[in-house]
Image (cartoon, grey):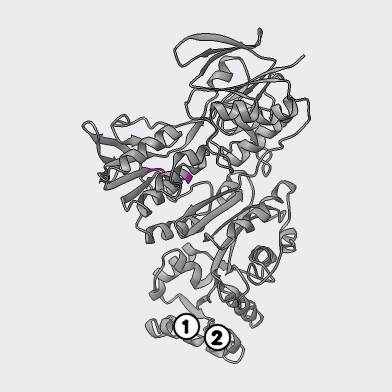
Amino acid sequence: MSQRVVVIGAVAAGSKAACRFKRLCQDAEVLLIDADEYISYGGCGIPYYISGDVSDEKELRSTSFHMVRDEQFFRQDKGVEAMPGTRALSIDRKNRTVRIQKRDGGQTDLSYDKLMLATGARAKKMPIAGMDLDNVFSVASLQQALAIKEQITTGRIEKAVIIGAGFIGLEMAEALSDMWEIETSVVEYCDQIMPGFVSKKLAQMAQHRMEENGVTFYLGESVEAIEGDVAVSAVKTGKRTLEADLVISAVGIAPNGDLAEAAGLEVAPGGFIVVNDRMQTSDSDIYAGGDCVQVTNLVTGKPGYYPLGSLANRQGRVIGTNIAGGNARFKGAVGSFSVKLFDGALAGAGLTPETATREGYDAVGIQAGQFDRAHFYPEKEIIFLELVVDRESRRVLGIQGFGGEASGMYARVNAVATTLQYHPSVADISNLELAYSPPFASAMDIVNAVANAAENYLDGSYQPAYLEDFLECWNNRDCGEYFFLDCRAEADAKPFEEKHPDVWKSIPHDQLQARINEVPRDKKLVLVCNTGVRSYEAQVNLAAEGIRDTYSVESGIAGLKECGMRF
């Protein structure tokens, strides 16, 4: 006897599960319902549709062979009955039915043998005045994206304010500022962009890259009200009032777990549907996946939330397999991500130093800067990786990086991300085998180099100066306590020495042994070079001479400049 499977939610996880199950059980009946008229679209592509990189919204709803995923496509190509514009009102688990409301307002019950919930998430709404004004949007659906694009193309939008500096906020800031040349400001409650996803050091690099492209940031500020009569005219924070013709709220999302909770399924605080590694809910005949579920964080072993399209698709396949009688598993996630910021890219996986510390680890983040390709290859750029490690166990807890969008930096993050669930040590990453060819990487890749730097730190031979450490020393350079020793070639170091002769001295690393008497022994020495390699070697050499009060500037002058520092 054939099964009837009902899937509630038809964007990523739901569509994938429905099609996977139908391929495995050709004689089954599959109903795919969604309250929205637009189904099975690439939500992560919305900022690129708004920017104009994706010219037509149908491209977000199309397959790679240019077929629009609408009702006709699902029926004819997949054998799935899609029902957009249909809202699921309730679930009767005892009688195995779902009460639905159709486009015309009529209600009916659908019976099911197996049920999947892919109810997704909704944009959080700030509890402030003005959220209902015209031209105030979130970016939680394709419908809202179309409305934003319509306003932008009128040519009347000159100033925009983005509330929130997470993924969507930054991507939307780029979209508005780059293609449409709209004066764009970002307001963020925390003291850095991408809070919880990258360290402050990498956040500063990414922020500086966006500022160079015209985006203004106001960090550590909360929005108190959105002002205007009918349409928005300004955003008021605790410190200022920003004029605005357009406001996009990107302060996070919340899972749509209400339907599951009303049906008596186990739902965690916050509305997250609880599932096992087969993606079953507390009712074994009901599955759930996508942005509405809670899964295991494979680094901490604790519950986590990862509303990412890549995970939703993988979960959908697992669910489709299991509904068909298989035994596929989704163990959890490490939270891998990447985000394009103009010509830069920010990526990461696992824990940041700050989140690791909150989880109880004795964590430290060690950063390295290096060319993305062989140093002798004509086309290359410096990229930055940060490895997060636990001091006592030497276990790697996370990795984040920043570099050019064509640098392959995200591939380095992916290489380490795949190992995190196995609790790798620093030594494992130091010896990680990576494909090598001069046009693509160095013989000692930056992945290996950052792990080597972490090993040196843990072994006690490397004492880094982080950005904030350097700034403290630099801002107090006239107190007589600090001295800056530049280990680069004379041509690079001399301008600094000539500008700051009392505190800055040029001694190229290959001359250090011969000129050791020129190194002051009564100062705290701040060692600098271009990326931190020569300054580290100088630190080791000086320690052998009994000079140990030294700090090697992490990622060197290149890292400081990438953070926006100018001497």
Which residue occupies 50% across, 67% down? 559
**Element class at badge 2:** loop
Q: Is residue 419 above or below residue 531?
A: above
Measuring from the top left, give residue 325's x and y in whole percent. Answer: 78, 25
Q: Quadrant of residue 118?
A: top right
Image quarter of the C terminus: bottom left
Q: Quadrant of residue 280?
A: top right
Left/right placement of residue 28 relative to residue 231 reads right
Measuring from the top left, give residue 491's x and y in whole percent. Answer: 47, 86
Measuring from the top left, give residue 407's x and y in whole percent. Answer: 56, 63
Q: Residue furthest left?
A: 229
> Mark 2 and mark 1 in contact (Cβ < 8 Å)?
yes
Whether residue 277 is visible to the viewer of this picture, yes or no, is yes
**Element class at badge 1:** helix
**Magenta highlight range:** 163-167
Which residue occupies 64% across, 29% down? 78
Image quarter of the N terminus: top right
- Marks 1 and 2, how far apart at CA: 8 Å
Which callout, 1 or 2, points at the residue further toward the start of the chain?
A: 1
Q: Which residue is mark 1?
A: 493
Q: Which residue is mark 2?
A: 508
Q: Residues within 10 Å of mark 2 (few under 14, many from 20)?
A: many
Instruction: Depth check: give the residue in front, 527 or 345.
Output: 345
Q: Is residue 165 magenta?
A: yes
